[in-house]
Image (tube, grey):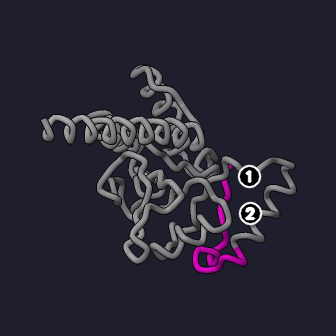
Amino acid sequence: IGLHPSRKSHKSERALKWEKNRLLSSLDMPDTNLGVRNHYLKTYFPDTWLIQEQIGIRYDSSVGFRDRPGFAAGTCRPYQPFDLTTNRLIDIWELPLCLMDGTITGNSNEIVNACIKIAEECFKHEGVFVLLWHTNRFHHSEYPQHSKAYPRILEYFSSRGCIGLTGGEIINQYKQYSENMRRFIKTDERNYKSLSLT
C-alpha cells in the first residue's frame, strides 16, 4: 500500500502527515514500509524529500516524466537523495518512475512496444522497471488500447523471468546492497592504508 497525496502536500509537512495518518488508521497498519507517489508527480526537491523524511515516509516514486517514458533521474536504480544544504544523505529512498501509462498512446501494439523499449533499457543497466498503470486504464470502454496492452505487458515480463515486488521490498534489497558496499569500501580503505604504510 502506498500513499497518493493531495496536490498541495508536497510542500506541506502538516498536510502530508495528516494524509499519512488517515491512510494508516483506516488500514490499521504500521508505517514502517510506507511509500509515496505525488499527485501529478508534483514535487519541490529537496524540500519534498525532507518533508517525507521528517514524517517517516520510507520511499518516494515521484521522479518521472509527465509527458514521456524514460529516466528523469538519469537512472533506473533506487537511490538515496543527497541534501547539499546539510551535506548528508536524506533518510528516504527514491524509486524512480520509468513509465506512466498516460505518456504512451497509440494502438495496443505501440503501447506494448513502448513499454518493452524502456524495460529493455532497465535490464541493460540492471535497474528496476517502475511502471505506473492507473486503474482506469483497465476499463475497456474508456481505454480499449491500454486495457488490451496490459496483459501483454505482463506476459512479456513473465517471459523474461521477471518478478514483481512491492516498493518496500525493492528498497529493502537496495538498502542491504548499499550497506554491504559501504562495509566493503571501509574495509578496502583500511587495507589500502595499511598497505601504503608498509
Which residue appears at 31% of the width and 40% of the height? Answer: 185
If the image is split into quadrants, where does the C terminus sit? Answer: top left
| Residue 113 visible | no
**Disc 2 marks which amino acid?**
Lys
Residue 5: quadrant of the picture: bottom right
Task: Indicate the position of residue 152 as horizontal and vertical percent values.
Answer: 47, 30
**Disc 1 marks which amino acid?**
Asp
Give the residue number, with chain letter if any, for mark 1.
31
Task: Indicate the position of residue 189 as horizontal and vertical percent values.
Answer: 26, 41
Is 152 or 19 nearer to us in this picture? 19
Residue 129: quadrant of the picture: top left
Where are the magenta residues, as a range? 1-15
Is 157 or 114 nearer to us in this picture? 157
Few, some or many residues within 10 Å of mark 2 (<14, 14–19, 20+): many
- Marks 2/1 in contact by CB < 8 Å: the verdict is yes
Which residue appears at 44% of the width and 55% of the height? Answer: 80
Few, some or many residues within 10 Å of mark 1 (<14, 14–19, 20+): some
Element type at marker 2? helix
Instruction: Give residue 20's mark.
Output: 2
Task: Indicate the position of residue 44 as horizontal and vertical percent values.
Answer: 48, 76
Left or right: 16 as drawn, with respect to 91: right
Task: Indicate the position of residue 151 as horizontal and vertical percent values.
Answer: 53, 32
Element type at marker 1? loop
